[in-house]
Image (cartoon, helix red, strand yellow):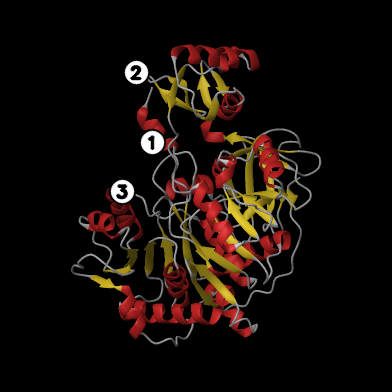
Amino acid sequence: MSTIGPYIDITMPDQFNMTAYFLEENLTQGRGDRDAVYYRDDTYTFNELCALTNRFGNVLKELDVGFEDRVLLVLQDSPEWLAGWFATMKIGGVPTHAYTYLQPDDYEYFMNYVRPRVVITDNTTIERVRKGTKAAKYPKATLVAGSDLPGLGPGEFALNPMLESASSTLEVEHTSKDDIALWNFSGGTTGKPKAVPHMHHDAMFGCESFQTVVRYTEKDVVLRVPKLFFHYSRDLGMNFAFHAGAAVALFPERSTAENVFQMIKKYKPTVLLNVPTMMRAMLQTPMEKQTDLRCLRLCIASGELLSADLYKEFTETFGVEVINTIGSAESYLGYFMDRPGQVVPGSSGRITPLVEAKIVDHEGNEVPKGEIGVLWVRSDASGWVYHLAHEKSKNTFLGNDWINTNDLFREDEKGYFWYEGRADDLIKVSGVYISPLEIEKCIEQYPATEECVVLGLKDMDGLLKTKAFISLKEGIKGSSELEKEIRGFCKQHMAPHKTPRFIEFLAELPKTGQGKIDKRRLREKGL
């Protein structure tokens, strides 16, 4: 039998707009004068953020952004990011976003794929975006936020003066609950990112499901480690927070352990959105550069596997509860989440409200509890297609709102779900399937290992071979002798045929903008 999350009674009006739901309800609730955004040394109330959003919407309309036109945000976290996002949806447009530290050829891909009418950039991204748009028909216009801008060319406009002269009055577009509201992008760890369109109503189901578990309040201040271009950060750290009247703290710089500690000291957040990679980096930060985390009532982790060891070390060191959640660009919401006070370290938590899940074999038949299979999930927030990827869509979006996550999971007798790897990561070596995650977990137990990822790569004969990419702890250097020791360690703790055939030591494993290990770049290294 499938597992069904708790039921919540939701009344969904036919006419529904995400900006009105997440942002402007604060005005009708009498929260207009409450703090909404902390940015550098500035504070924006909900009244001020709504006014900035309205001015931004009028700027976009001046540039002929209309119903269902796409707008691509490629700028650092800022009030302009927030206002550009909400303004696009308020006028019926469709926003999406890209990481700010990509290369020009990556932005060329986004321009040709998204085909945005307008791109919103700033002085940190404009040059690379320019190079990426040379061979693209889109965008029709580029807005550049900030001051001290470089010389602007044809089709480029300084955003700040346009905002200053724009009206702060703007009517919300009468969008349907079933109109396209936004695009989520898959992580792109193994190939080019793919976009999943989502409707306005998906957001309400996602928010109501989350709030039942975490319960943001007006007293909360939410700080994010991952940037707003990551949908986990955007929703849990902006949309869902605003809907509850909570404030959000923004910083434009890249997230490092040191500046995360500095932001915690500066803004005293009550909730920290984190990723396991940063949790480890925070633990390794010298004591004199750390900050007391007692202001936090909760740390939320997502984006990658949170091991039991890391969970225990973080909670014991900093004295803050950590809850894990897992979702996807396809599902919009988090389908598994820990309940505060009920965490089972190493698990992915229990099913969230409004979600149904089942674990199946390769024929789509449900497996008994305790057995490993492929996870399927569904909810009323589910997407239904990858943009411009018909064949891939058929393998993921299965009808009746079911999504094939392609993740291997098992469910225990208490309803906790345990991640066991990716179904498409299984490596068939000499006729036997091997789980890379099992090998990774083993190697990460070796004392010298900092991080590890195992891939199946083809040799010159086209045969799959296992290769482990390993970063070592500070002060330890890779060597042939260390390689032999790791192989011996693997053979002691696993079946011998699971020992990786090849090992490469790297100073640091490459990461995507979401902080996940970039397997695509590692595959390019080959054997």
Q: Position of residue 239 (x, y in %)?
A: 56, 67
Amino acid at circle 2? Met
Q: Residues within 10 Å of mark 2 (few under 14, many from 20)?
A: few
Q: Which mark is residue 460?
A: 2
- Residue 347 in view here: no
Amino acid at circle 3? Gln
Which residue is tagged 3? Answer: 103
Q: Position of residue 422 (x, y in %)?
A: 56, 36
Q: Position of residue 79 (x, y in %)?
A: 45, 70
Of the image marks 2 and 1, the number of the one nearer the N terminus: 2
Q: Place residue 348 in its image quadrant.
A: top right
Amino acid at circle 1? Arg
Q: Residue furthest front?
A: 288
Q: Quadrant of the C terminus?
A: top left
Which residue is tagged 1? Answer: 521
Judged from the image, the secondary structure of the residue bearing numbered disc 1 is helix
- The answer to whether residue 402 is above or below residue 423 is below
In the image, taking residue 57 as reference, residue 20 lies left or right, namely right
Q: Quadrant of the N terminus?
A: top right
Judged from the image, the secondary structure of the residue bearing numbered disc 3 is loop
Q: Place residue 138 in its image quadrant.
A: bottom left
